[in-house]
Amino acid sequence: MSKKKFLCVHRSAPGAPRTAPSADEMQAAMARWQAWKAEFDAELLDMGAKLQAGGAVVRDGKVTDGPFVEGKEVLGGFMILETSSLERAIEIVKAMPMQVEGAAIEIREMASF
């Protein structure tokens, strides 16, 4: 069975209140994260990263620094999966711990050339 690549774009809930977890909560969350990562490690091609604020948009040869109407406030990070199907990618993402209420992960198959 051939594998496909899927880009997972993490979008946080705009304006969602965030409270810092306690040390015990953080330790428990990290244990859940490590267990998830170990379970799906063979399909986690690139764990990606959190995106920094700022950046640039190039459109029609012009460069702007924002505001990014569609995403500056909500685009938080990315990850690349390599797995058999969109359904499997959805299964992996749904199992991911530490998801914030109101946040979303967009999953898109990457075209091969």
Image: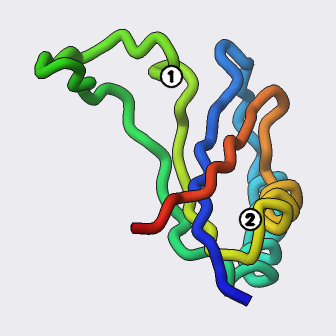
Vertical order, 50 against 71 (above or below): below
- Residue visible at 59% across and 44% down in the picture: 9
In the displayed structure, 37 sits above or below 17; it is below
- The dot on residue 71 is 1
Residue 101 seen in this snapshot: yes
Q: Which SS class for mark 1?
A: loop
- Name the side, left or right, on which 23 lies relative to 62: right
Query: Residue 107: horizontal and vertical position, in percent?
Result: 68, 49
Which residue is drawn at the image coordinates 82% and 57% (left, top)? 90
Closer to the camera in the image, 27 or 32: 32
Mark 2 or mark 1: whose residue is earlier in sequence: 2
Q: Amino acid at mark 2?
A: Met
Q: CA distance from mark 2 to mark 1?
A: 27 Å
Give the image quarter of residue 40: bottom right
Foreground: 13 or 111? 111
Foreground residue among 1 and 12: 1
Q: Which mark is residue 30?
A: 2
Residue 105 on image: x %, y %: 71, 42
Labels in figure, total? 2
Circle 1: is it few (<14), some (14-19), or many (20+) Cα within 10 Å?
few
**Residue 96 visible within the image:** no
> Quarter of the image containing the N terminus?
bottom right
